[in-house]
Amino acid sequence: MDERFEDFVAERADALLRYGYLLSGNPHDAADLTQEALVRLHRAWPRVRRKQAPEAYTPRVPAGARVTGHPRDRA
């Protein structure tokens, strides 16, 4: 795994979890959104890193997951 990705996750995971909580309203869904955000970011990391924009890209991921069919939305 790319060391820069690991460093980015170590620095930003707590903030992503808090953001997920703001979007979902509960800690379990916040953890799910954070996990989904990190999976999507990992897939896109080479492109995001090349553009030097992980801070800009990352907050859009949990919001996109929330809008596009997070399990909570289907209930």
Image (cartoon, rainbow, N blue to C red):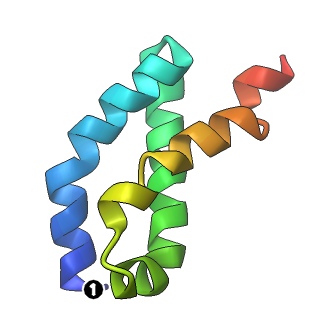
Give the vertical position of 25 relative to 47 (above or below). above
**Left or right of 65 in this view: 31:** left
Which residue is found at the position 35% from the left and 69% from the top?
Answer: 53
User: Residue under circle 1?
Assistant: 2
Give the vertical position of 33 relative to 61 (above or below). above
Residue 60 horizontal/vertical position (percent): 52, 48
Which residue is found at the position 85% from the left and 24% from the top?
Answer: 74
Q: What residue type is labelled 1?
A: Asp
Residue 50 horizontal/vertical position (percent): 37, 88
If the image is split into quadrants, where does the N terminus sit? Answer: bottom left
Which residue is found at the position 25% from the left and 37% from the top?
Answer: 15
Name the residue nearer the viewer: 27 or 57.
57
Name the residue nearer the viewer: 29 or 45.
45
Residue 55 horizontal/vertical position (percent): 31, 58
Q: Splitting the image into 4 quarters, where does residue 56 fall?
A: bottom left
Which residue is found at the position 77% from the left and 40% from the top?
Answer: 68
Q: Splitting the image into 4 quarters, where does residue 63 fall?
A: top right
- Crowding around mark 1 (Cα neighbors within 10 Å: few <14, some 14 to 19, many 20+) is few
If the image is split into quadrants, where does the C terminus sit? Answer: top right
Residue 20 horizontal/vertical position (percent): 44, 30
- Count of numbered circles on the image: 1
Q: Splitting the image into 4 quarters, where does residue 10 fall?
A: bottom left
**Left or right of 73 in this view: 3:** left
Which residue in the rendered view is the most extreme toward the right? 74
**SS for callout 1:** loop
